[in-house]
Amino acid sequence: QVQLVESGGGLVQPGGSLRLSCVASGFTFSTYAMRWYRQAPGKEREWVAAISNYGTNTNYGDSVKGRFTISRDNTKNTVYLQMHSLKPEDTAIYYCKTVIGSYDYWGQGTQVTVSS
């Protein structure tokens, strides 16, 4: 079955960096685009970034553009989110997602907390 497992979250000071990973299994990873979302307490889930199946195209939400970079390694079935210049408002649970047919598949999320 399709599984997405995120890791790499943690506590970081403002201005710091983190790299999130999402390992996929149960489907042909290189066939599908991948996306990162986040959800802060009391807020709706927000799209963060997307990458095409071979990584040639990427897109970012306005709030993270210029600070976050999405990438993927199809040999490792893994998508990454490199985050720099983190701000307290980046605090959220970060999820990876893929869409296969008419189904959305989500990971369990990884917590990122930006605080001094």
Image (cartoon, grey):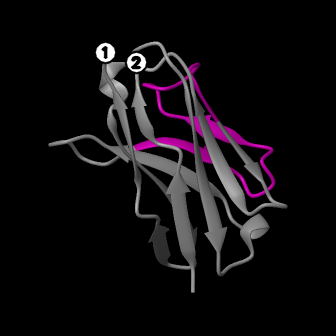
On residue 85, which mark appears?
Answer: none
Type of amino acid under label 1? Ser
- Amino acid beneath label 2: Gln
Mark 2: secondary structure: loop
Q: In terms of depth relative to the viewer, which is nearer, 81 or 14?
A: 14
- In this rendering, would 65 be left or right of 12? right
Q: Position of residue 37 (x, y in %)?
A: 43, 48
Sequence order check, earlier mark of 1 and 2: 2
Q: Which residue is drawn at 60% across and 49% down?
A: 21
Identify the residue at image location x=81%, y=54%: 54
Q: Is residue 91 left or right of residue 17?
A: left
Whether label 1 touches label 2, CB < 8 Å: yes
Q: Quadrant of the N terminus?
A: bottom right
Q: Say few, some or many: other residues with alpha carbon within 10 Å of mark 2 (under 14 / 14 to 19 / 20 or more).
A: some
Residue 66 at x, y percent in the picture: 59, 19
Residue at image mark 1: 116
Q: Give the range drawn in magenta.
A: 47-69
Q: Which of 78 and 49 is in front in this view?
A: 78
**Magenta stretch contains residue 48:** yes
Q: Which residue is drawn at 85% across and 61% down?
A: 75
Residue nearest the observer in this picture, 5 or 71: 5
